[in-house]
Image (tube, rainbow, N blue to C red):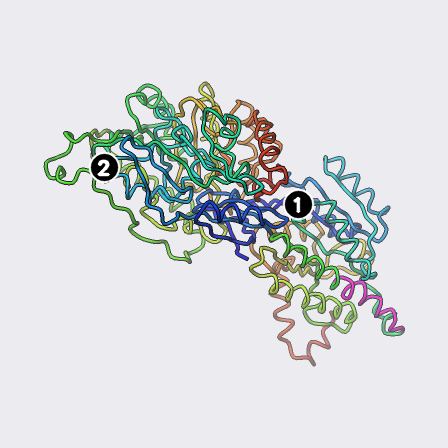
């Protein structure tokens, strides 16, 4: 048996871990699941308990030995256990990029679909699931099914954001995005407060494929919600300086350093983080255009530091990510203000403007503003603060992201996801014996 | 089910449904607004009814069951039934116990045996059964109410002290046995607590209320502590007392 947590390193539970590398192995691990059921796990980057199954079985999906195939039109045939990192190593040199990537490359394709992950291009390209054209899915009885988005509408939609509870994705065909170079041309702007930041995003986001803002959640008053906005798109070949033209699609993976297993307690406190935030804000140019950044630097800054989740110490951290609809800017301001008031030591606060949502009951994105905030779990008063903010989000018709949430009141989830019953009925159909179970499903009473 | 990332449980089992400290712990856990089901196991369930009603008024699903800690042969079946009711046990609180009368116990050893049954032998059986359940479900916290009286037996109440010493050793060992299983044991050693059990006794220095024990337990459930003194300072006091040579300790007016 193995103790497992999510990326936030909270609420560890014990499960039997079975590593699978093929469709057949997944099917057999599902058929022989113990009483407490089975759930798939990729690289464990969900912040919460989505890929844990206390007292049951967890199947850890890894890529088979099959080589990654990309056809001339950019359609990649992938094992669900293939990581975005592994995919990029093959795809980028051939002129392809993943259609959507979150802030880390260390997630699997299966996980990307099951959480329907979004990235900096959501306002243009939608979520990961929008770019999947075929899936092989193992149902609760261990049967394999080949699904297409147009013919298997209900099940397909439930798989996107279904957190592994309506089938284990074994393989997927993903349509890649063509790139001429592996460099991103980035424009950076500093915004003096939250209103300024939102105004800049609202008026000019459409001019960029990729856009995201870092928000300082430790300043109050006139500078409340100040931030740094970075936007850009892949550079074309003619944008490269002569020195870079020899290998325009160069790509290197790997991280610069690893956080040691033991860090001093309370390393991240409001003083160290205030200093960091000040530096981060000052370091950013007031305005700069056309800076060429690598894929790693622009899309995956966190991958530069392996095991960065250890920075929060032994009691771990939670990431609270909400989306509130367009028009709820006042509430967003209140939320940012509440974090600032509480002096939560958070150095990772990200604001992004979403485009239209998907036709999928549990897919998180919806048109509006999404704010993601990391907070150490041991911050006093955190539970009550987040409970208050959850209520605020529900009242304006927003929701929390189930790949992040590790503590919401279960009663609040149905109003956040009004189509939850569709997930339930798909689940009853594809898993009549109730084999797919996770700590998340138990916590939410599903 | 499961204790969430910020340490809030949803399903709680209280062994000793009428215990003041046990009830205070449940009240404290309910405060986080995640508890949805509680099972109260008491020798006289009707005496636990007022507390059950208080919880029901808060919208909690409560089952009150008859449970005799000293009837060890019934434990397996009763605990199985109680846990079927709950689903998983996120937090189990072993709070049943008696103080006993030291003078009576010395005069009539069978009274001492009864105290040992209620405080040690019975709870040993309960804890071992619950330990197995928590191990099987892969998560959960067992809170065991020990006492500083077990840290070093005193002339004035060594019968009670010896039963708590036994339970404390059992719970500590069980905590080690469960290490790495996802389940955890929290041993709580309160000093003098104002409860109906201690009503009429002279208060000792560092006396606390059940609510103080409860908030220390909540913190331990949310965190990683395996041993909690309430109040915290009494841990330091006990370290000093334990270090005293016996001839001196024997003469202390405690």
Question: Splitting the image into 4 quarters, where does residue A435 fall?
Answer: top right
Q: Are marks 2 and 1 on the same chain?
A: no
Q: Residue at x 45, y 52 (%)?
A: A313
Residue B252 appears in the figure = yes
Residue positioned most to the right: B108
The vertical placement of A419 against A112, above or below, is above
The reply to whether the magenta stretch includes residue B23 is no
Q: Secondary structure at mark 1?
A: helix
Which disc, if any, is residue B29?
A: 1
Q: Secondary structure at mark 2?
A: loop
Question: Residue B198: x and y, percent?
Answer: 79, 58
Q: Quadrant of the C terminus of chain A?
A: top right
Q: Position of residue A9 (x, y in %)?
A: 48, 49
Q: Position of residue A359 (x, y in %)?
A: 48, 24
Q: On the rendered structure, is A399 left or right of B190?
A: left
* Residue position marked by numbered label 2 in the rendering: A182
Q: Nearer the viewer, mark 2 or mark 1?
A: 2
Can you say which quadrant of the picture contains the N terminus of chain A?
bottom right
| Predominant SS along the magenta part | helix
**Callout 2: residue from which chain?**
A
The answer for how far apart the CA atoms under marks 2 and 1 are is: 52 Å
Q: Nearer the viewer, residue A99 or A366?
A: A99
**Placement of A127 over or under A250, stated as above or below:** above
Crowd tier of the residue under label 1, counting other residues whose Cα lies within 10 Å: few below 14, some 14–19, many 20 or above: many
Compared with B28, B102 (above or below) is below
Q: Does the magenta portion include B114?
A: yes
Q: Chain of mark 1?
A: B
x, y percentage for residue A237?
16, 31
Q: Where does the magenta region start and end?
A: B108-123
Tell me whether the residue at label 2 lies in contact with that at label 1, contact meaning CB atoms closer than 8 angstroms: no
């Amino acid at each position: 048996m193995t103790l497992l947590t999510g990326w936030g390193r909270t609420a560890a539970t014990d499960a039997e871990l079975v590593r699978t590398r093929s469709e057949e192995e997944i099917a057999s691990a599902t058929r022989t699941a113990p009483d407490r059921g089975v759930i798939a796990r990729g690289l464990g980057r969900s912040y919460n308990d989505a890929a844990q199954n206390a007292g049951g079985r967890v199947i850890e999906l890894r890529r088979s030995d099959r080589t990654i195939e990309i056809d001339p039109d950019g359609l990649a045939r992938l094992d669900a256990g293939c990581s975005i990192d592994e995919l990029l190593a093959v795809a980028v040199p051939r002129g392809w990029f993943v259609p959507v990537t979150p802030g880390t490359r260390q997630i699997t394709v299966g996980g990307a679909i099951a959480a329907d992950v979004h990235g900096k291009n959501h306002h243009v390209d939608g979520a990961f699931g929008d770019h999947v054209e075929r899936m092989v899915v193992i149902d609760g009885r261990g049967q394999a099914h080949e699904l297409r988005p147009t013919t298997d509408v209900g099940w397909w939609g439930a798989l996107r954001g279904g957190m592994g509870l309506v089938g284990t994705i074994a393989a997927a065909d993903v349509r890649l995005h063509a790139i001429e170079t592996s460099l991103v041309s980035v424009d950076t702007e500093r915004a003096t407060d939250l209103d300024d930041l939102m105004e800049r995003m609202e008026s000019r986001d459409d001019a960029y494929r990729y856009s995201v803002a870092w928000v300082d959640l430790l300043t109050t008053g006139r500078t409340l919600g100040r931030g740094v906005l970075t936007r850009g798109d892949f550079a074309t070949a003619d944008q490269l300086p002569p020195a870079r033209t020899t290998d325009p699609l160069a790509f290197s993976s790997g991280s610069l350093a690893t956080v040691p297993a033991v860090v001093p307690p309370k390393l991240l406190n409001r003083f160290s983080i205030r200093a960091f935030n000040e530096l981060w804000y000052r370091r950013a140019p007031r305005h700069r255009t056309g800076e060429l950044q690598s894929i790693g630097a622009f899309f995956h800054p966190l991958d530069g530091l392996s095991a960065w989740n250890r920075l929060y110490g032994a009691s771990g951290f939670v990431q609270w990510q909400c989306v509130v609809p367009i028009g709820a800017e006042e509430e967003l301001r209140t939320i940012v203000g509440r974090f600032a008031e509480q002096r939560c030591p958070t150095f990772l606060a990200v604001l992004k403007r979403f485009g239209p949502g998907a036709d999928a009951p549990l897919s998180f994105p919806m048109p509006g503003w999404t704010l993601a905030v990391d907070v150490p779990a041991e911050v006093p008063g955190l539970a009550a603060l987040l409970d208050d903010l959850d209520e605020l989000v529900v009242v304006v018709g927003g929701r929390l992201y189930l790949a992040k949430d590790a503590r919401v009141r279960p009663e609040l989830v149905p109003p956040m996801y009004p189509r939850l019953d569709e997930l339930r009925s798909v689940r009853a159909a594809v898993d009549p014996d109730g084999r797919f179970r996770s700590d998340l499903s138990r916590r939410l009473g599903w | 089910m499961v204790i969430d990332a910020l340490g809030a449980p949803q399903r709680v089992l209280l062994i000793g449904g009428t215990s003041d400290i046990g009830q205070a712990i449940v009240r404290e856990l309910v405060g986080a607004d995640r508890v949805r089901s509680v099972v109260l196991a008491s020798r006289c369930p009707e005496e636990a009814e007022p507390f059950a009603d208080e919880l029901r008024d808060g919208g909690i699903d409560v089952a009150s069951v008859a449970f005799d800690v000293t009837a060890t042969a019934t434990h397996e079946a009763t605990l199985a039934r109680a846990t079927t009711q709950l689903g998983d046990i996120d937090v189990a609180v072993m709070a049943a116990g008696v103080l006993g009368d030291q003078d009576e116990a010395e005069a009539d050893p069978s009274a001492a045996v009864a105290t040992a049954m209620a405080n040690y032998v019975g709870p040993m059986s309960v804890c071992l059964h619950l330990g197995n359940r928590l191990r099987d479900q892969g998560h959960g916290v067992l809170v065991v109410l020990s006492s500083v009286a077990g840290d070093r037996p005193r002339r004035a109440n060594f019968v009670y002290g010896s039963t708590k010493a036994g339970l404390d050793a059992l719970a500590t060992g069980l905590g080690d046995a469960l290490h790495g299983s996802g389940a955890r044991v929290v041993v709580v050693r309160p000093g003098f607590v104002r409860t109906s059990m201690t009503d009429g006794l002279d208060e000792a220095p560092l006396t606390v209320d059940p609510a103080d024990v409860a908030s220390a337990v909540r913190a331990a459930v949310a965190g990683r502590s395996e041993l909690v003194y309430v109040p915290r300072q009494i841990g330091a006091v006990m370290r000093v007392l334990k270090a005293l040579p016996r001839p001196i300790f024997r003469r202390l007016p405690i």
